[in-house]
Amino acid sequence: MSRPGSPVSLDDLPGSVLRGRYEFGRILGKGGMGAVFEAVDLSLSRPVAIKVVLPTLAAGPEARQELFARFRREARITASLKHHHIVEVLDFDEDPDFGILFLVMEHLHGTDLDRVLSKEKRLAAQRAVIILSEVCQAIGHAHRAGQIHRDLKPSNIMLIARDGNPEFVKVLDFGLARGEVEETKLTRTGQIMGTAFYMAPEQIDSQGVPITRSCDIYSLGAVAYHLLSGRPPFLGSTLLDIWKGHLFERAIPLKTVLPDIPEFLSTAIERALAKRPEGRFPSVEAFRDAMQAAFSSRTPARMAAPAESPSVAEPRKDANPTPEKPVPPGASRLSLALKKELTSQRDRILGTGPGTLHKTASGIATVFTRSLSGCPEIVCLSLGQSLHTLHQTVLPRSQGDPLFCSAASLAKDRSFLVFTLARPQDGSSPVFACVFSEASADTFAPSLLSEGAITAEAPRVAVSPSGAVVTAWHQFSGSELRTVVSWWNPDRRETSRVSIPDAAFPSIATHGEKTICAVHELTATGRVLVLYTFDTPGRPPFRTELTGLTRPAFPVLAAGSEGQAGLVFWDLAPSPSILFQRLSRDGQPRSAPIFMGAAATPPRCPALTAIPGGFAAAWAGRASAPGRFPLSVCLLPGTSSPLSPPLVLDEGEISHPSLLFVPGNLFAAWRRVSPSGSGLWAARLALEPA
């Protein structure tokens, strides 16, 4: 039954019947000029959604007239774009009795990508590409009809269950859409149209550049960047800061901060984000094909980067040749003594999988983040020599959901822990540190290390012989990427810190009171591997760049005996490989890098630990079949002696190994993903004479 009289506000509409046909239900979403309601089409007994705008809220007659025109255009355009990935429009009109403009659409039961990101922070690469490919289908259909969306963003991309697909895409809100030759008065007056985080530069300041379908390609690139990295390509404290990013700054390449994603996917998104339209893909279909090629058995012959961006680094002419196969056995070999899964099927390992293995008074321990029944938490697992659990400590949650963690041993059965927490309220991931006991969580009192609303990842910690602690992590703040190195005295108070710009995925090792930090760094010529040696905490370091590499990633350091250190890392040329570099205690290379074996693609973080007379390394090798990566462990003598043959510990969806030597045994831990979830595995290996 219709309610007598006209509602005076949007809140009065629920329960009213419009035109004797549409009964308003609850509000699904609200904006400055109107709202979207759940409703029922009484004549057909079907659920619908009604978008309502109150013209009286427009500021002045001209704005009201433009609002009418834009709303009619949205209805006309959306109704004309019949496509299974575009929301269907069923009715449109103005109702003077209610004083509203209304648009009746199919009712979609699902969630938009904005809410998905709020809950999950970022998506796996293949899942993101599947969703984006369906968005490209919808926008490609609109482009062929001569229409430009101009406001693509996560909240305008709906995921529903349909035809057995739990994430079927529907594109919403063509309210800013227009034809490539169409222009409204509001556009002519220069008002900026769109959403700041995803707007093409020409939408902000056209400088004579027409608004074409290429602006939708840029917005799709910005959405793709957000889905994969957990943040838009440009951030800022003001709207002007965000616009400046789109106009003048280069987004940090995804491959720099997320080495796990395929190379062609990173390059495709970088091209979509080119500042000028001619630097982008010629069509959304071409962008879709480039993204999908990253997961196919073939890849495009050439994926050009944007004209204004540095191209993918070519192998340098002075590159050191690497042997194609491992060298003959050395003086020692490894044998597998024991292997077992440490977690149950109810666990789901989060972040980077197992944290660093470290010694305790009773044996060994590892910290990791897991989700048990949907509740993220940090767990310390203390193990005996036979890998049996001595005790498990769940550390209290603090101000967010834990993502990444790493720990190192201190004296008297205590550990120093660094970890990051996800804060859904502002999208930040700050860094915390604390000292805790493996046997009790009572001493857990974390201190905040980072400042401001930053996104931090890859925390690392090392302890010097004197008991001083060094921590490191990389963080995003706005569009800025940097690595932070922080020193703590034996009383657990921070004494100094240093920031390294454009650096990611740090690894740290201590030699006496010296600190070496390895990072991969973004330069004008591409990604490089750099070693920073700090003679004194907080003082300017000595910088050494390793030459002869192509696209190095995931450096891992370990301090050895006899005044030497080791470095293991992933590199692209001549094929994806794991390389080992001997270093002096000052972080200087002692010889050319040594080829250890073929590596997984995309790159995965290796592991390194010191053993008597050398080092041991672990890495995920080249896949023998989809999802089957061998986990190899190899001994690396500290002298010029040859390598031992690698021992394969496991095979599957392997990532993030960790190693620890305890006299007589080498322990390994790693993450393995299976259809039932992701588990933590460990092994004990014996070192035997060759």
Image: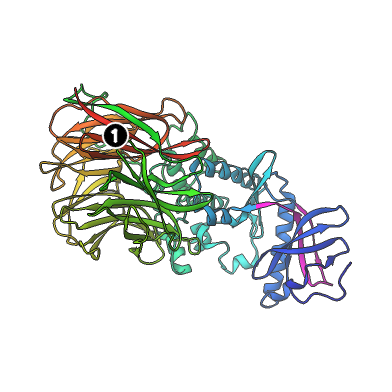
Q: Is residue 110 visible?
A: yes
* Residue 273 locus on image (x, y percent): 46, 51
Residue 152 visible in this rendered orientation of the protein: no
Amino acid, disc 1: Ile
State which region is magenta: 89-110
**Residue in the image at 32% along x and 60% along y:** 434
User: Horizontally, is 64 left or right of 383 in the view?
Assistant: right
* Above or below, comparing residue 676 to residue 202 in the picture: above
- In the rendered image, residue 93 lying in the magenta stretch gets the answer yes
The spot of residue 585 in percent (x, y) is 13, 46
Q: Which residue is mark 1?
A: 578
In the rendered image of this protein, does residue 264 appear above or below residue 411? above
What secondary structure is the magenta-colored segment mainly? strand
Q: Secondary structure at mark 1?
A: strand
Residue 576: give x, y in percent of width and height.
33, 32
The answer to if 155 sits in the magenta stretch is no
Name the side, left or right, on which 360 lies relative to 464. Answer: right
User: What residue is drawn where x is 54% and y is 41%?
Assistant: 288
